[in-house]
Image (spheres, rainbow, N blue to C red):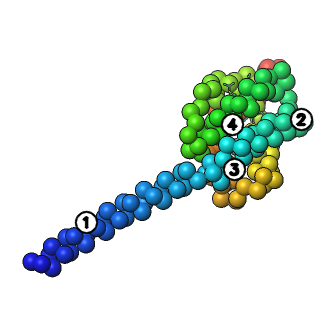
Amino acid sequence: MRSLVTSARFAVCTVLCATLVTTACQAETQGSLYAALGGRSGVHAIVSDLIDRATASHSTARSFDGANIPRIKRLVEEQICALSNGGCEYTGDPMRDVHAGHEISQSEFFAFADMLDQIMVAHGVSLGARNALIAKLAPMARDIVEAPRQSPAP
Ligand code: HEM
């Protein structure tokens, strides 16, 4: 009987411990992406560099002509903070609405993602954190990239 009680206690303890460890690990992983990106100042610097570069590079600048750059910087920063569990709420418009009509191509999207990766390297962000952020942004391509406009039939 005593051994049954001991076994039951052990089982409960094992489940509780496993739950606590899992919760702690999840909290660490979630909280740490924002931290691994350099926290508020790191994300601010990365986004600022990204948009400066995207608006200057011939591979991505086209669609930014006439755009409100301070607004884009503020909202991309907010969005990355929200995605990396930095405690922000994204207050901008949906990705599909914002990018609609700019005819952003897949190669422009890849060039933008590649710039982001290079800028994160320059800011000393680890490979794991770079991959984690890119993995969160990549699915947005379906809302951002538009099929090239069809040429009118001859
Ligand atoms: C995952 C990648 C991207 C994210 C997370 C992103 C995010 C954003 C955000 C948050 C805004 C501002 C939203 C608002 O005004 O409410 C924005 C605007 C804009 N983005 Fe992106 N973007 C991405 C990729 C791109 C790419 C690849 C291009 C072009 C090469 C691009 C071009 C623009 C332009 C032109 C605007 C301003 C649109 C307008 O005001 O008419 N974005 N983006």
Q: Position of residue 46 (x, y in %)?
A: 76, 44
Residue 68: where, in percent of width, then height?
A: 78, 22
Q: Quadrant of residue 10?
A: bottom left
Image marks 1 and 2: residues in contact by CB distance under 8 Å: no
Q: Earlier in the sequence, mark 1 or mark 3?
A: 1
For residue 96, above or below residue 124: above
Q: Residue furthest left?
A: 1
* Residue beneath disc 3: 38
- Between circles 4 and 3, the one closer to the viewer is 3
Q: Amino acid at mark 3?
A: Gly
Q: Which residue is mark 1?
A: 12
The quadrant in which the N terminus is found is bottom left
Query: What is the distance, in whole Å, between disc 4 and disc 1 at their CAs?
Result: 44 Å
| Residue ID for mark 2 | 56
| Kind of residue at disc 4 | Glu
Kindly report which numbered mark, 1 or 2, lies closer to the viewer in this rendering. Answer: 1
Q: Quadrant of residue 126?
A: bottom right
| In the image, farthest residue toward the front | 41
**Please, what secondary structure does the residue beneath circle 4 have?**
helix
Q: Quadrant of ligand 1?
A: top right
Gap in angstroms between the C-alphas marked 4 and 2? 19 Å
How dense is the environment of label 3, judged by Cα within 10 Å: few (below 14), some, or many (20 and up)?
some
Q: Residue 127's spot in the image, x, y percent?
A: 70, 59
- Of badges 4 and 2, the one in the foreground is 4
**Dots 4, 2 in contact, CB < 8 A:** no
- Count every numbered label the image shows and give the total: 4
Which amino acid type corresponds to the residue marked 1 in the rendered image? Val
Residue type at the position of mark 2: Ala
Q: Earlier in the sequence, mark 2 or mark 3?
A: 3
| The disc label shown at residue 77, or none | 4
Q: State the CA–CA distance, disc 2 to disc 3.
A: 24 Å
Residue 82 in the image: state x and y as whole percent.
59, 39
